[in-house]
Image (cartoon, helix red, strand yellow):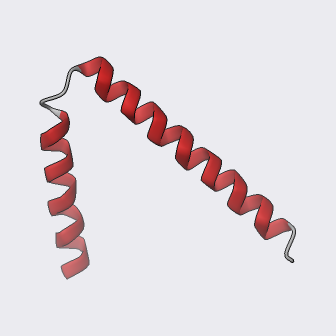
């Protein structure tokens, strides 16, 4: 439960910071993070298929 509260607190802080940024900058940051997560997911899936 404490982890959930901490996660929600962190989410609130991040979203509060994003509201002060211009929309194009926020969208660009979201796109970069999304691409990073996509690359990470693909690498993890490929690593799971080919164990060493």
- Describe residue 21's horizontal placement relative to residue 47 as left or right: left
User: In the image, residue 30 lies at what x, y percent?
Assistant: 39, 35
Left or right of 43 on screen, residue 31: left
Residue 24 can be seen in this image: yes
Q: Is residue 44 left or right of residue 34?
A: right
Q: Residue at 20% across / 48% down in the picture?
A: 14
Query: Going 14% across and 51% down the picture, which residue do you hit?
Result: 13
Q: Is residue 1 visible?
A: no
Quarter of the image that includes the N terminus: bottom left
Residue 10, image x, y percentages: 19, 59
Can you give x and y, in whole percent of width and height, for residue 35 in the image?
Answer: 55, 39
Query: How many labels were placed on the picture?
Result: 0
Compared to 39, does 7 lie above or below? below
- At horizontal 47% and vertical 35% (from top left) the residue drawn is 32
**Is 28 left, or right, of 21 in this rendering?**
right
The image shows residue 42 at horizontal and vertical percentages of 70, 52
User: Could you say which quadrant of the image residue 7 lies in?
Assistant: bottom left
In this view, 18 is above or below 41: above
The C terminus sits in image quarter: bottom right
Q: Quadrant of residue 18?
A: top left
Location of residue 36 by image quarter: top right
Kindly give the residue lying farthest to the bottom in the view shown. Answer: 1
């Amino acid at each position: 439960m404490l982890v959930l509260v901490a996660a929600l607190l962190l989410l609130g802080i991040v979203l509060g910071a994003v509201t002060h940024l211009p929309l194009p900058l926020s969208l660009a940051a979201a796109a970069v993070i999304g691409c990073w997560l996509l690359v990470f997911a693909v690498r993890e899936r490929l690593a799971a298929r080919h164990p060493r």
